[in-house]
Image: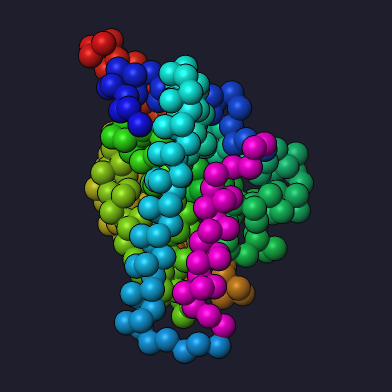
């Protein structure tokens, strides 16, 4: 496979952002993340056979094998596919690369998911809002009130600005579609096995740590981009976003997720976090931001605006870099 030049990569990344804005997550062909998820599930069955008792050290070693195997397969598959497309014709290589990079990001998908919660809330249909909220969070939604549902949607969008936009594009810049898909595989591993519970505490340890490392720099960039986006949005506060990162981000159990969530809470002037219910058990999540007013459904719209402004800022930066280096 011939490496793309930096100007070519910058244009391909720009095209991927626009493709995602217009098309979003593809219904056909099957989204690559679905195939990654199936691979993870099959490998877990092989590495943790039913009925076999494994100690913590064994589980950690097998979890490392899982993480290395899945990320390597994702990278190798995209290397082969984009290389083949490029060998057939350079323009086919461009198209395939831009398309696969676009499948690693999900600006439109995040917006659509948030709006599915917002619309029934705005119409006063809390039951429907709870149903759509259950699609995007793992917490119990049956007893959620309007504020809880709106908060869940806002937290999901804020956290995934890193996972579903900034991180994959930075990896695409470093290594095209193959490295972007390696990142997506690492993130999918974390979402499937990176839990601190009895089942995955040891087996998912490597996947969780890998995700933390991959997102470390992108998460910190997200704080800056969200603050600038707030500066460009009437009624939101860039200064408060930056102060919220300093005051609250470290309270989040994740070394990365607290940054975009704190920035969003500070920018909008609301408090995120609080009581969540998982499998019938209430759990206190770190409270982020200052509750200058009661959180409301319209804050979902404000969060979506921050999401799109952040993506526009990154697109502008990519195009500006292209003009400089071309």
Instruction: Work out whether residue 128 can be spotted.
Output: yes
- Residue 230 vertical placement versus 11 (above, below): below
Q: Is residue 122 left or right of residue 269?
A: right
Where does residue 252 sit, x and y in percent of width and height? 35, 59
- Residue shown at the point (57%, 61%) measured from the top left: 138
Highlighted magenta segment, given as a residue range: 28-50
Viewer-proximal residue among 31 and 139? 31
Instruction: Specify how the rendered protein is coloured.
Output: rainbow
Q: Is residue 199 left or right of residue 13?
A: right
Count how many numbered circles sit on residues in the image: 0
Where does residue 13 sit, x and y in percent of width and height? 40, 25
Which corner quadrant holds the C terminus? top left
Viewer-proximal residue among 76 and 179? 76
Q: Is residue 231 left or right of residue 113?
A: left
Instruction: Work out whether residue 267 can be spotted.
Output: no
44 is within the stretch colored magenta: yes
- Please tell me in which quadrant of the rendered image residue 140 appears: bottom right
Where does residue 189 sit, x and y in percent of width and height? 45, 59
- Residue shown at the point (39%, 70%) measured from the top left: 63
- Residue shown at the point (68%, 49%) measured from the top left: 132
Q: Is residue 297 left or right of residue 7?
A: right
Predominant SS of the magenta segment: helix
- Residue 103 vertical placement versus 219 (above, below): above
- Residue 286 vertical placement versus 103 (above, below): below
232 is within the stretch colored magenta: no
Which corner quadrant holds the N terminus? top left
Where does residue 248 sit, x and y in percent of width and height? 31, 53
Viewer-proximal residue among 11 and 315? 11
């Amino acid at each position: 496979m011939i490496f793309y030049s930096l100007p070519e990569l910058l244009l391909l990344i720009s095209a991927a952002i626009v493709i995602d804005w217009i098309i979003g997550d593809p219904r056909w062909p099957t989204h690559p993340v679905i195939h990654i998820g199936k691979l993870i599930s099959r490998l877990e069955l092989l590495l943790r056979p039913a009925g076999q008792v494994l100690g913590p050290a064994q589980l950690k070693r097998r979890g490392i094998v899982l993480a290395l195997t899945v990320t390597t397969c994702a990278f190798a598959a995209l290397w082969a596919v984009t290389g083949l497309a490029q060998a057939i014709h350079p323009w086919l290589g461009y198209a395939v690369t831009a398309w696969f990079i676009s499948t690693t990001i999900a600006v439109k998908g995040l917006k659509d998911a948030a709006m599915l919660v917002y619309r029934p809330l705005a119409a006063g249909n809390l039951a429907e809002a709870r149903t759509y909220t259950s699609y995007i969070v793992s917490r119990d939604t049956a007893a959620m009130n309007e504020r809880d549902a709106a908060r869940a949607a806002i937290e999901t969008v804020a956290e995934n600005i890193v996972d579903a936009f900034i991180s994959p594009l930075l990896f695409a810049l470093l290594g095209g579609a193959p490295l972007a898909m390696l990142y997506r595989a690492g993130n999918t591993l974390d979402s499937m096995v990176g839990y601190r519970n009895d089942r995955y505490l040891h087996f998912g340890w490597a996947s969780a740590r890998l995700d933390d490392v991959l997102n470390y720099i992108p998460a910190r960039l997200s704080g800056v981009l969200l603050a600038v986006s707030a500066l460009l949005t009437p009624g939101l506060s860039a200064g408060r976003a930056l102060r919220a990162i300093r005051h609250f981000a470290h309270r989040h159990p994740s070394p990365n997720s607290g940054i975009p969530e704190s920035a969003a809470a500070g920018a909008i002037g609301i408090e995120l976090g609080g009581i969540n219910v998982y499998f019938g058990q209430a759990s206190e999540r770190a409270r982020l931001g200052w509750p200058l007013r009661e959180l409301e459904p319209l804050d979902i719209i404000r969060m979506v605006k921050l999401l799109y402004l952040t993506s526009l800022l990154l697109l502008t930066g990519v195009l500006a870099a292209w003009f400089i280096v071309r």
